[in-house]
Image (cartoon, helix red, strand yellow):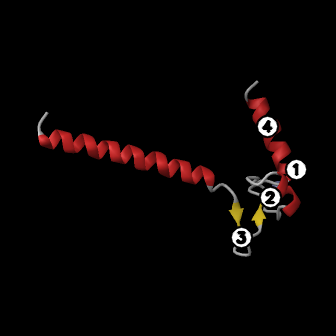
Amino acid sequence: MDNADYAADLEQLHIAHALSAQKQSSQDAVQRVSNTGNVHCLDCGFKLDTERLKVKPGASRCVDCQTDFERLHRHRHR
Ligand SMILES: [Zn+2]
């Protein structure tokens, strides 16, 4: 292997790592947080209960939408 090939391989490796890191961070940032710090439901935009966020800190939907989402999701896999 010459140096140019080796450099190209390294570059590919870096790109792959960067892409997977990017994917990870976008998955982490699914919550819709307003500039007042309130978290809003992804589906209906309703402000999420602070109590709900205490119980489920990563919640990105209100109880109703989450229930619907899970129901749909389960159906799709049947
Ligand atoms: Zn909702």
Residue 5, x across and y down, in percent: 17, 39
The reply to whether callout 1 and callout 2 are in contact (CB within 8 Å) is yes
Q: Amino acid at mark 1?
A: Asp
Q: Secondary structure at mark 2?
A: loop
Asked whether, in this view, residue 27 is left or right of residue 1, the answer is: right
Q: Single out the residue that lies furthest toward the bottom.
A: 36
| Secondary element at image label 3 | loop
Mark 1–mark 4 Cα distance, whole angstroms, equals 12 Å
Q: Residues within 10 Å of mark 1 (few under 14, many from 20)?
A: few
Q: Which mark is residue 44?
A: 2
To which residue does mark 1 refer?
64
Q: Which residue is mark 3?
A: 34
* Residue at the spot 76% in from the left edge and 54% down from the top edge: 57
What's the distance in space between the residues labelled 1 and 3, CA to CA?
20 Å
Label 1 CB sits under 8 Å from any ligand 1 atom: yes
Marks 3 and 4, how far apart in space?
Answer: 27 Å
For the residues carrying marks 2 and 3, which lies nearer the camera in this image? 3
Above or below residue 3? Residue 49 is below
| Mark found first going from the N terminus, 3 or 4 | 3
Residue at left 83%, top 37%?
71
